[in-house]
Amino acid sequence: MPLLEVNNLGIDYITEKGTLEAVRDVSFTLEKGKNLGLVGESGCGKTTVAKSLMKLLPSNGVISEGEIIFKGQDVVEMTKEEVRQIRWNDISMIAQSAMNAMDPVYKIKDQIIEAIKTHQPQVSKTEAIERAAKLFELVGLERKRLESYPHQLSGGMKQRTIIAMALALSPALVIADEPTTALDVVVQDRILHQIIKLQQEINSSMVFITHDISVVAETCDQIIVMYGGRIAEIGSTRDFFKDTHHPYGLGLQNAFPSIKEIGERLISIPGSPPNLINPKPGCRFAPRCPFVEDICYAEMPDLIEIKPGHYSACHFTDKIDQFRKEAKLRETWERVKERQIKKQLTR
Amino acid sequence: MIKMVLKRLGQTILSLVVVATIIFFMFRLMPGDPTAAVVDPSISTEAREAMIQRLGLDQPLYQQYFSFLSDAVRGDLGRSFYYRRPVMEVIGDKVINTLMLMLSAMLIAYVIGILVGAYLAWKRGSKKEATLISIALTFRSAPTFWVGMLFIMFFSFRLGWFPHSGMRSSGYEAANTFEVFFSLDFLRHLFLPAVVAGLYFLATPLLMMRNTMLEVLGEDFIEMCHAKGLKEKVILYRHAARNALLPVVTTGALFLGQAIGGQVLIEYVFGWPGLGTEIIQAAQRHDYPLAQASFLLIALMVMIMNFLADLLYSYLDPRITYK
Ligand SMILES: Nc1ncnc2c1ncn2[C@@H]1O[C@H](COP(=O)(O)OP(=O)(O)O)[C@@H](O)[C@H]1O
Ligand SMILES: [Mg+2]
């Protein structure tokens, strides 16, 4: 039995302008001890998927369809109290906004103890402090920092504290939502490796969210590329990087080249992710795709199996060799920009 | 910390001098002849002049001002023109009485306001919220004397639970100083006026608490509390309310200043021997020393309260440190 199995997940946000279709038809499985990378530009629904796993969506967010089977139980169907009990104990989160993730009026120590004692009331206070100190050692923080208030820590220290806190109960699943984006580039890498090392130590699975696709290559077993709330491509990390099949995935690799290609100039994908309130029919990526054809505007492509476990949602998976060659060229993406400008002018 | 206390003390003294100056000149710029109030107009001109001389009213304004200041520093706030007794004798007790009443009212308003305000934020958009806010606003908008009379009618005359007026039963003698303010008799007299004034004040802390709570509930650390699997009550009171409290405390201190001036109508309706009525009469009678002293005492108390609020604030919010 996989640790986590998500089937046909659909999530809406109710907004003043109408229903925003934040996530549609997302399905994946995650085995125990494995890491899943969730990538895509900002606004593609990554955080929304992550939060739904522990039912932490904001009040206007609703899971409209699908199931989230965690350890054999459907999280979607759970009562508030049942969800509360699996939070942090079984699924913890290193949030995107860890900078403000701690209550400013309590000491760090008390906030870690609180997390431990909420789920393990039998643990004594001194025991909890000992455990917090040990975690601090693991993330490279001095023990005396436990006595600090959040405002007395630097960004990197705060992030380490959150990491320590997230691992305090050895949860089966850790969700890391862009855990380093708010940090200095210098410490980003170090903290990233710390997360991976610790998470492997306690043998938990991880959902790792990032918009930097190159990070996933080093850290994850599986990757999902999301675009406009849908899966564009899903597969093992090895298959994906060796054999990318979706034009969006190709574009992302240009924008975040892996280490060996550094020095080449970055090519970004012109335009931005679509508005998901009453989205247009057809492929969500069509308006930004260099290889677009008429059918792309008319029909939503299904996920097509390329090989077992590797799927891509593109009408033209058979033309991938040509796509791959052209996607490396700047002119290809310039064409998209020209097309977008032309369209704006005619409107 | 000590440095901060000293600094604040200096600021307080400076502010007091400024306030004293403003008060002194304010009363002298008011239209009307004060001597008329003090000196019987029917007496002879010589006697009148002698009187004015004795009171020092013939001296130039700046001399009056400096003798006022130097006396004040020595704790002598002069003699009331009207009562012909030292000012402190006239208002000393009354200041305390007003303070007792207003502190009780504030306590009622802030304890209820903070707890209910926090709860309202949690129940945002519910019928309960609308009802409770309407009630608070009704008490804020209704004339206090009217609410006061209704309460007297119902709780003293109909039910006979509380005395309708005054601060003590006649003939009551306190056994010791402690019992002057902490006897059952006093508390029973205090109850109705404190509740009526408290209900009047209630809307401020209640709405303020509710609004800051709503803000706090949207912050990242609250989401983190949910992610940690904390119970709702814990999140609501230990985290959200605790943070929302900070601005409410600050305004509370400022608000107290306003309250100490006295709710004249409440003191009047409940026959509470407080400062409110005294101040108004003193101003009308051109009783400079009395009015000056009252305002100065109020200013002093407001400053002390603000100082205490600052200390409380630095205790409540670890991000604030005084250096
Ligand atoms: N609370 C919310 N209310 C309305 N829309 C939201 C809310 N949160 C996110 N969205 C929208 O849902 C989409 C997905 O957002 P998100 O999951 O945060 O994306 P990502 O994490 O990939 O940047 C975006 O279009 C975003 O504007
Ligand atoms: Mg996000």
Image (cartoon, rainbow, N blue to C red):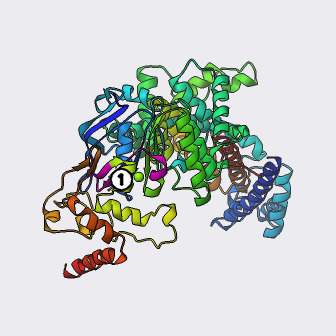
Q: Nearer the viewer, residue A119 or A30?
A: A30
**What residue is shown at x 36% (from left), y 70% (from top)?**
A328
Location of residue A104 by image quarter: top right
Helix or strand or loop: what does disc 1 sit on? helix
Q: How many marks?
A: 1
Q: Nearer the viewer, residue B117 or A25?
A: A25
Q: Is residue B82 above or below residue A128?
A: below
* Crowdedness near tag 1: few (<14), some (14–19) or many (≥20) residues, C-alpha within 10 Å: many
Q: Is residue A233 magenta?
A: yes
Location of residue B94 in the rendering, given as x and y in whole percent from the top left corner: 67, 39
Direction from residue B13 to residue A297 in the image, left or right? left
**What residue is shown at x 35% (from left), y 34% (from top)?**
A4
Location of residue A162 by image quarter: top right
Any part of residue B252 in sight = no
Location of residue B137 in the rendering, given as x and y in whole percent from the top left corner: 40, 44
Q: Is mark 1 within 8 Å of ligand 1?
A: no
Location of residue A5 in the rendering, given as x and y in whole percent from the top left corner: 31, 35
Q: Is residue B321 above or below residue B241?
A: below
Q: Nearer the viewer, residue B117 or A149?
A: A149
Any part of residue B91 in sight = yes
In the picture of the structure, the residue carrying the numbered disc 1 is A240
Direction from residue A273 to residue B215 in the image, left or right? right
Location of residue B111 in the rendering, given as x and y in whole percent from the top left corner: 53, 34
Q: Is residue A229 magenta?
A: yes
Chain of the residue under label 1: A
Chain part drawn in magenta: A216-234
Q: Amino acid at mark 1?
A: Phe
